[in-house]
C-alpha cells in the first residue's frame, strides 16, 4: 500500500467532506466530526487509512445542510457581528465573514483577532468550535502555504464556533492557589440523578449559576506556566474520565481533547492571550464536572490504578483506534498520545484504553 503523507491525507479528506453541513443526527445538533477525525487519524500516522475512514464516516450518520448565507456581517462593525454570536441560522454568514477575513490577512492575524472574541463562548457546539479550529490550525501550520481547502476549513471552524457561541455564567481567572488536582477535589458535587445522561446534563448546564461551588471553583486555579498547566489539566481529566464509567462515555472525553486542542493553538497566538485561553478551558471543566458527574467516585486513585494495570502500548492503542473507527476514540487516542509524549502519565493510556472499551465501534 502506498504511504500517504499527512498533508496529502488531510487535503484529500477535506475535499471528500466538503459538501457536509456543520451538524448531524436526528436532533441536528451533533457536530460534524469528519474534518477533526480525519486530521487526527493523519496525525497518528495513518494517512493511508484516511480516505476509507472518511467514506465510512459519510454514511454512518446523515448530516444536515448548513444554513445558507443571508446577511453579510461586517468585521469592522462590532454591532454587526456581536449580535450574531450564538445565532446558528447565521452560520453561513459567519463562514463567509471568516473566509473574507482569511482572504484579506494572514491566517495568524485573523486567528489572533477572533480567538479572544470567541473565547467566552468556548462551550460552543459542546466545545467542538474550539476543537475543530485547533485541528484546522495544526494542518495549516504544517505546510509552508495553506491550500484553499485548509483555509475554507479554518473559516468553517471559526464560523461554527461563532454560530454556536455559548457563554457560561461567571468568568474564570488564574489567580487562585490550587493546582488542578486540588481544585477538582475541592469542588462539591454529590447531587442529582445517577447515571447522568446527556439530557440531564443539558439541564444542569442551564443552572450552573445555582450549583454550589461553581463560582468559587472558577477562581481556585493558580497562575502556573501555561504549558505545565495544560499538562495538569489533561492528565487529571484523563483520570476523571477513567474513574467515571457510570455515565455516558463520550462527553467527558472533551475534558482532555479541549485542553489538548488549545495547546495546538497557543504557539500561534500572542502571549497575552494565553492565560485567558486556559481560564476559558477551566470554566468548561467546571461545567462538565457539575453537569456530568454526581460525585468523585475514585478519581483520586486513578494514578495508582493506571500504574498497576497492564495496558497496551500507544502503538497498539493507535492501531486499535483505527480499527474501532469511532471519531471520538480516534481523537481521544491521538490527544492522549500527544499529551503523554510531552509529560508521561499512565492515566493517558488507561483512559484511551477505557474509551476503546466504552464507546461503540463504528
Image: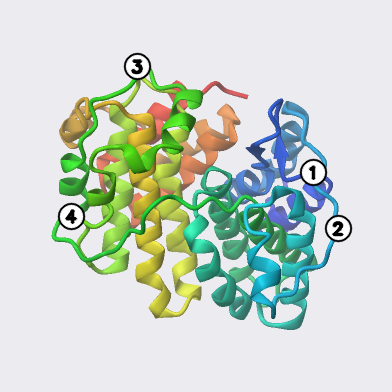
Horizontal and vertical percent position of residue 282: 34, 53
- Give the camera-side residue of 63 and 327: 63
Could you tell me which quadrant the N terminus lies in? top right
> Which dot, 3 or 1, sits closer to the camera?
3
Q: Which mark is residue 194?
A: 3
Q: Is residue 349 visible?
A: no
Q: Position of residue 334 (x, y in %)?
A: 48, 46
Label 1 vs label 4: CA separation? 41 Å
Give the structural element (helix, strand or loop) at label 3: loop
Name the residue at 15% across, 47% down. Answer: 182
Task: Please give the residue where the numbered disc 4 appears in the rendered image.
Answer: 179
Which residue position holds label 2?
70
- Please rate how many residues cluster around mark 1, counting C-alpha atoms within 10 Å: few if below 14, some from 14 to 19, many from 20: some
Q: Taking the image as drawn, is residue 56 in sight?
A: yes
- Mark closest to the chain's N terminus, 3 or 2: 2
Q: Are the two marked residues, 3 and 4, in contact with CB atoms closer than 8 angstroms?
A: no
Residue indicated by mark 1: 20
Q: Earlier in the sequence, mark 4 or mark 2?
A: 2
Residue displayed at 72% across by 68% down: 98
Position of residue 28 in the picture relative to residue 318 (left or right): right
Element type where label 2 sits in the image: loop
Label 4, label 2: how far apart the Cα atoms are: 46 Å
163 w.r.t. 304: above or below: below
Helix, strand or loop at label 1? It is loop
Amino acid at each position: 500500500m502506498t504511504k500517504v503523507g499527512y498533508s496529502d491525507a488531510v487535503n484529500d479528506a477535506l475535499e471528500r467532506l466538503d459538501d457536509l453541513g456543520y451538524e448531524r443526527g436526528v436532533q441536528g445538533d451533533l457536530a460534524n466530526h469528519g474534518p477533526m477525525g480525519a486530521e487526527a487519524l493523519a496525525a497518528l500516522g495513518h494517512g493511508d487509512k484516511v480516505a476509507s475512514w472518511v467514506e465510512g464516516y459519510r454514511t454512518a450518520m446523515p448530516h444536515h445542510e448548513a444554513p445558507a448565507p443571508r446577511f453579510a456581517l461586517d468585521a469592522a462593525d462590532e454591532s454587526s457581528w456581536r449580535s450574531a454570536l450564538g445565532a446558528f441560522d447565521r452560520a453561513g454568514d459567519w463562514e463567509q465573514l471568516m473566509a473574507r477575513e482569511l482572504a484579506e490577512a494572514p491566517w495568524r492575524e485573523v486567528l489572533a483577532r477572533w480567538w479572544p472574541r470567541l473565547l467566552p463562548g468556548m462551550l460552543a457546539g459542546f466545545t467542538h468550535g474550539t476543537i475543530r479550529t485547533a485541528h484546522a490550525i495544526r494542518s495549516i501550520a504544517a505546510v509552508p502555504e495553506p491550500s484553499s481547502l485548509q483555509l475554507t476549513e479554518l473559516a468553517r471552524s471559526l464560523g461554527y464556533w461563532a454560530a454556536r457561541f455559548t457563554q457560561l455564567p461567571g468568568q474564570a481567572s488564574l489567580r487562585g492557589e490550587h493546582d488542578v488536582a486540588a481544585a477538582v477535589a475541592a469542588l462539591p458535587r454529590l447531587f442529582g440523578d445517577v447515571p447522568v445522561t446527556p439530557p440531564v446534563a443539558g439541564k444542569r448546564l442551564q443552572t450552573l449559576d445555582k450549583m454550589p461551588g461553581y463560582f468559587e471553583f472558577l477562581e481556585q486555579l493558580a497562575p502556573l506556566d501555561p504549558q505545565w498547566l495544560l499538562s495538569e489539566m489533561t492528565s487529571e481529566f484523563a483520570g476523571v474520565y477513567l474513574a467515571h464509567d457510570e455515565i455516558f462515555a463520550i462527553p467527558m472525553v472533551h475534558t482532555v481533547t479541549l485542553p489538548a486542542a488549545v495547546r495546538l493553538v497557543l504557539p500561534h497566538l500572542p502571549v497575552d492571550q494565553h492565560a485567558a485561553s486556559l481560564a476559558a478551558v477551566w470554566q468548561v471543566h467546571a461545567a462538565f464536572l457539575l453537569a456530568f458527574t454526581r460525585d468523585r467516585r475514585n478519581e483520586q486513585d486513578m494514578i495508582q490504578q493506571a500504574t498497576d494495570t497492564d495496558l497496551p502500548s500507544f502503538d497498539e492503542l493507535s492501531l486499535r483506534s483505527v480499527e474501532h473507527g469511532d471519531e471520538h476514540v480516534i481523537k481521544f487516542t491521538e490527544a492522549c498520545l500527544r499529551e503523554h509524549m510531552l509529560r508521561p502519565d499512565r492515566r493517558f493510556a488507561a483512559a484511551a484504553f477505557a474509551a476503546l472499551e466504552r464507546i461503540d465501534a463504528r
